[in-house]
Image (cartoon, helix red, strand yellow):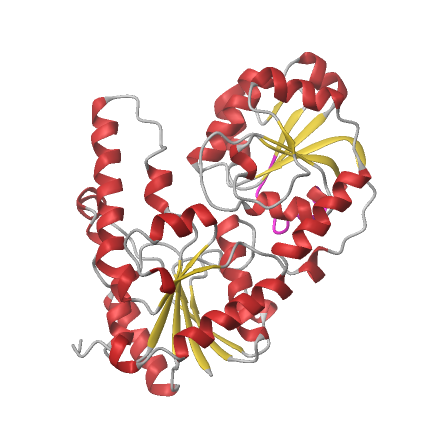
Amino acid sequence: MNILFFTDISPFPANGGEKIRSNYLLKALARLGHQVIALVQNEEGVDLANYQVENVVFYTHAKRSLDVVDRLAGKHYFQRSGTVLQLFGEVCSRHKIDVAVLDYGYIGQYIRFFTSRGIRVVLGTHNAQPMITQQVPAKNIIAKIRRFQLVSLEKLHERLYFKKAAAVLVVSEDDRKYHERFIGREKVFFVPNFLDEKEYALSCKKQPKVLVMTANFGQYMNFQGLKWFVEEVWNQELAERYDVWLVGRRSREALTQLTGADKWNNIVALGKVDDVKWYISVANGVIIPLLHGAGTRLKCLEAMALSTPIISTSKGVEGVASKHFLIADTPEEFRKVILDFNGDEAIGQALREDFMREYSADVNTQRLRRVLSYVTNVRKSEYADVQMD
C-alpha cells in the first residue's frame, strides 16, 4: 500500500511532544511494510538524509506565514495553501496513493483533495484542542473574547471537516468521548502517544541529586506548571537536597521570566537539546507539575520507558494507564513527596512494564494496522466525495 503522510510540523529532530508523535506514527506506518511518501516541514533545516527511514520518501514544504488579518480572522483554519495543494498533486501524479494520513493541527480542509480522488483519509489528532484552548488563562475581557473566538473557530473546523475522514485517531479516552459527540463512533480510533521501546533501552547511572522537567516551555500549560513549581513548591530545603534540570525549548526564557536568570536556587535551564533521553535516564526522578492540558503526555511516557520514577500532579499523568506515579496536587503535598523521595528502582521498573503493555511501538503498530484495515474496507459508496476540486 502507498500511504501519503502529511503534517504541518517538522518531525526531525524529535525534540518536542508533537514532533515525537508524528515521528513515531510515520515510522509505525513504514514498519507495517507500506511505502510512505512523507510531506513534512523542516523548520530547523536538518539534513533529512540523517533521518532516513526504511520505506519512507521525504518531501518538504515551507511553513505558511500568517499576517495579522489571517490570525485575527482565523482564516488559516479553513484556507488551503496553493503550494501544499500543488505538492499533493505532484505526489499523486508520481505515486498511486491508497490512503492519506493527515497528522496534527487544523488541516481538515485538505481532506476533500483526497476524497474527491477516491483516496481514503485518516486524520490524526494530538489533542482535543478546544478543550486545551479553553484552559488558557484570560486575565481581562479582551483576552476572554479572543479565547472564545479561538475555541469557536476550532470547534467549527472540527464540525466542518473531521467527519469527512474515513477514520480519526485520538490519543486518550477523554479525547475519544469528545470526538464521538460529532463523529460516528465507529470512525474514532484510540492510538495513544507511543514510543519505540528499542530506542529507550538506555542503561545510565542515576544521579541521586537530580530531578528533571522536560517540556516545550513556550506552551502555556508547561510555563504555568513551571511557574507554580517555582513560586509555590520550590524552597530552600528542597534546593539543599536536589538540583532541577529544565530541558526543552524556551526553558531558559521561561526561567529567566520567572526568576530573572536561567540559573536560580539550584534550578538550571538547559534549553533545547536534540534528544532528552539521556537527561531523563540519569535523573533520579521526573517532575510533571502541570495544572492544565489534555491527552497523553509524552514527557510522562518517556520517563516510563526509561524506568525513571515520576512525581506529578493528577493533571500531569491524566489518562496514562499506570498506578505507579507519585501524585501530589497541592504545593505542600508536592513538596513533601519530593522530600520523602529517595529514588526507587522498583517504581521505575513497574512504570517500564506499564509502558510496554500500552505505549510501546509494537502494541501501537498493531493498533494502526487495524485502523488501516478498517479504512481500506470502507465501501467506496459510503465514503467518496464526488465533488472535484
Q: Residue 354: x and y, percent?
A: 68, 49
Residue at image x 60%, y 25%? Answer: 328
**Residue 8 visible at all:** yes
Please tell me in which quadrant of the rendered image residue 289 appears. Answer: top right
Q: Is 294 part of what is drawn in magenta?
A: no
Q: Position of residue 17 (x, y in %)?
A: 52, 49
At horizontal 53% and vertical 19% (from top left) the residue drawn is: 259
Q: Is residue 301 left or right of residue 45?
A: right
Q: Is residue 244 above or below residue 88?
A: above
Residue 47 in the image, given as x and y percentages of width and height: 55, 66
Asked if 219 appears above or below 138 in the picture, the reply is below
Give the left or right position of residue 16, taking residue 237 as reference: left
Report the magenta residues as a range: 270-279
Dividing the image into 4 quarters, which one contains the C terminus?
bottom left
Which residue sits at x=65%, y=19%?
335
Quadrant of the rendered image containing residue 152: top left
Outermost residue, top side:
236
Q: In the image as oriented, which residue stretches furthest toward the front?
A: 185
Q: Is residue 117 visible?
A: no
Viewer-nearest residue: 51 or 171: 171
Q: Does 12 sit left or right of 78 as displayed? A: right
Dividing the picture into quarters, in which one does residue 109 lie? bottom left
